[in-house]
Amino acid sequence: MSKPAARAYSLSAARPGRSIAVASGKGGVGKTWFAITLAHAMVLSGKRVLLFDADLGLANVDIQLGLMPALDLGCVVSGSATLSDAIAGFAPGGFDVVAGRSGSGSLAALDPAALESLLSALASAATHYDVVLLDLGAGVDRAVRRMAAWADTAVVVATEEPTSLTDAYATMKLHTADRPGGDARLVVNLCSSPSAGERTAATLTRACHAFLGRTPPLLGTIRRDAHVQDAIRRQSLLLTRHPNCPASLDVEQIAARIADAGPAG
Ligand SMILES: Nc1ncnc2c1ncn2[C@@H]1O[C@H](COP(=O)(O)OP(=O)(O)OP(=O)(O)O)[C@@H](O)[C@H]1O
Ligand SMILES: [Mg+2]
């Protein structure tokens, strides 16, 4: 099968990209859905976006988008394709995607030199975009840590659940060790209300301030919203299907804040 022709970049438009890794520690907090929706929100505000599914273990950008990629990250890692070959246009969202591959192992199993060469290929690809979003796997294995530290910004997604909070804190702690003075920000997803989300964020930021000496800014809260499940079930984009639902408005606000944000942390 040939590669989709809808490649969003042209060589003449090359300039440095900005990379944002979406991490969490705990699984199932909404990283993949958030990364997809953030990618779409950024496209709607005029950005050229590459969404990189950095999860080989339980990849699901492809599932959530209903993609059947001819080439994916598994091919890149096994050496049968280059990263640039595995970039495919996703026309409904207007962004490009490097799909992961469910069940094909983990980037953690990749030797460090191979991971570095993957990241340098990604850095080259990034020059064709305004933003590269990395949807990281759950956990804090070596590859997840390295990619979170590699990105210009790490966005740590937490929920109100105590286990998510402790895992988000652990992710922040490792990011602080790997990238002292780096830019890490916080998103609280699945909030019962914006103020409950802000309270959760305040708990986490207090711990980061007290024990890590950094105060990760809150990028925003995202309300728990049944429209999210509906869009995922239908493999459609939330901002297309339910543009005015609470979760859509929350992600659009976060996209606008990221666009304005400079380094902090
Ligand atoms: N704001 C929200 N409102 C309602 N449901 C949500 C919201 N965010 C995420 N979900 C639900 O959470 C589920 C898990 O989301 P997702 O697969 O994006 O999580 P993840 O963090 O990427 O998981 P993994 O760690 O396994 O990669 C989704 O299928 C969706 O049903
Ligand atoms: Mg995921």
Image (cartoon, helix red, strand yellow):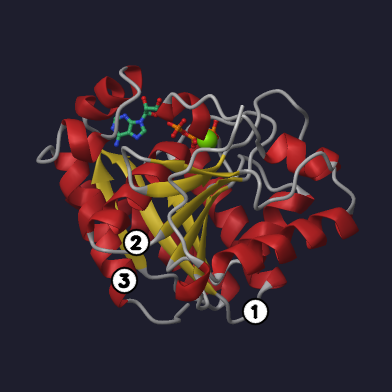
- Percent of width and height locating residue 128: 51, 67
Closer to the eye: label 2 or 1: 1
Tell whether label 3 touches label 2 (CB within 8 Å): no
Q: Is residue 108 left or right of residue 233?
A: right
Q: Secondary structure at mark 3?
A: helix
- Percent of width and height locating residue 70: 62, 29
Tell me the tag on residue 180.
1
Q: Is residue 158 visible?
A: no
Dot 3, crowdedness within 10 Å: few (<14), some or many (≥20)? few
Closer to the eye: label 2 or 3: 3
Nearer-N-terminus badge (2/3): 2
Which quadrant of the figure has residue 255?
Answer: bottom left
- Percent of width and height locating residue 87: 57, 47
**Is the C-beta of the residue carrying label 2 under 8 Å from the nearest atom of ligand 1?**
no
**Viewer-side residue, 23 vs 164:** 23
Q: Residue furthest left?
A: 244
Q: Which residue is mark 3?
A: 259
Please give the name of the residue rendered at 26% of the width and 63% of the height, measured from the top-left corner: 46
- Percent of width and height locating residue 89: 46, 44
Tell whether label 1 touches label 3 (CB within 8 Å): no
Q: Is residue 87 visible?
A: yes
Q: Which residue is mark 2?
A: 202
Q: Secondary structure at mark 2?
A: helix
Please give the name of the residue rendered at 65% of the width and 79% of the height, measured from the top-left corner: 180
